[in-house]
Image (cartoon, coloured by chain):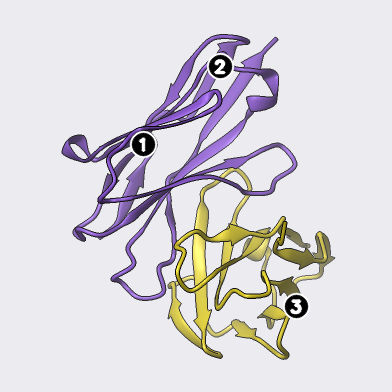
Amino acid sequence: AQKVTQAQTEISVVEKEDVTLDCVYETRDTTYYLFWYKQPPSGELVFLIRRNSFDEQNEISGRYSWNFQKSTSSFNFTITASQVVDSAVYFCALSEPNSGNTPLVFGKGTRLSVIA
Amino acid sequence: EPEVTQTPSHQVTQMGQEVILRCVPISNHLYFYWYRQILGQKVEFLVSFYNNEISEKSEIFDDQFSVERPDGSNFTLKIRSTKLEDSAMYFCASRGQIQETQYFGPGTRLLVL
């Protein structure tokens, strides 16, 4: 069965600090996709990144970076030099394309508060 | 940039009433989804839809729920007789055939009184 665990419920940092959001997943499939979505206070879900299980290269996009490690079943997300606008709930999610019409399984989310 | 749209943004209804939530997926997408998020909780899968039929549904998606694609653009979620516990944010999502990224609409916040 698929499962996504985000152990950090809430994190508070001061602006300009770096912060890492943890995500651990469980799946029996060898082919799967991992995602991060951002949910700002306005409520919408904003897609940030998708990673497939065969691509363990880390990715950097501006102040955002992602560390995918199959050995530990983790897909962690780091924000460098955090800003107040980064305050949001961040969800990690998993889908298994070989398991039908690939619904996403979400973690419970991590609420990040960046204080000025 | 194409996006998923949802209407209404907010809906307040009385318990027992029927509600229809509407979504317009991205135009060349083929796979459609409904998810819900009870306040402060995680996003939960309700149903997926492809080729004019339901492909998967969760245990939440009971007989009170139905989905339809009445024309070439809209994708609707109907709740026949709303309960207090149906109060949540409902998200529609769509994806294209090749990409595995689901893009979400802005959500409909449903409040059942």
Q: Any mark on residue A23, and which? A: 1
- 2 and 3 marks on the same chain: no
* Horizontal and vertical percent position of residue B76: 69, 79
* Horizontal and vertical percent position of residue A94: 38, 53
Q: Which quarter of the picture shows residue B85? A: bottom right
Q: Any mark on residue B20, and which? A: 3
Disc 1 is attached to a residue of which chain?
A
Give the residue type that dot 2 points to.
Ser
Hue used for the chain lettered B: yellow
| Residue B61 seen in the current view | no
Disc 2 is attached to a residue of which chain?
A
Q: Which residue is mark 2?
A: A12
Disc 3 is attached to a residue of which chain?
B
Marks 2 and 1 close (CB-CB < 8 Å): no
Q: In the picture provided, is A3 more to the left or to the right than B100? A: left
Q: Nearer the viewer, mark 2 or mark 1?
A: 1
Marks 2 and 3 close (CB-CB < 8 Å): no
- 1 and 3 marks on the same chain: no
Label 2 packing within 10 angstroms: few (<14), some (14-19), many (20+): few
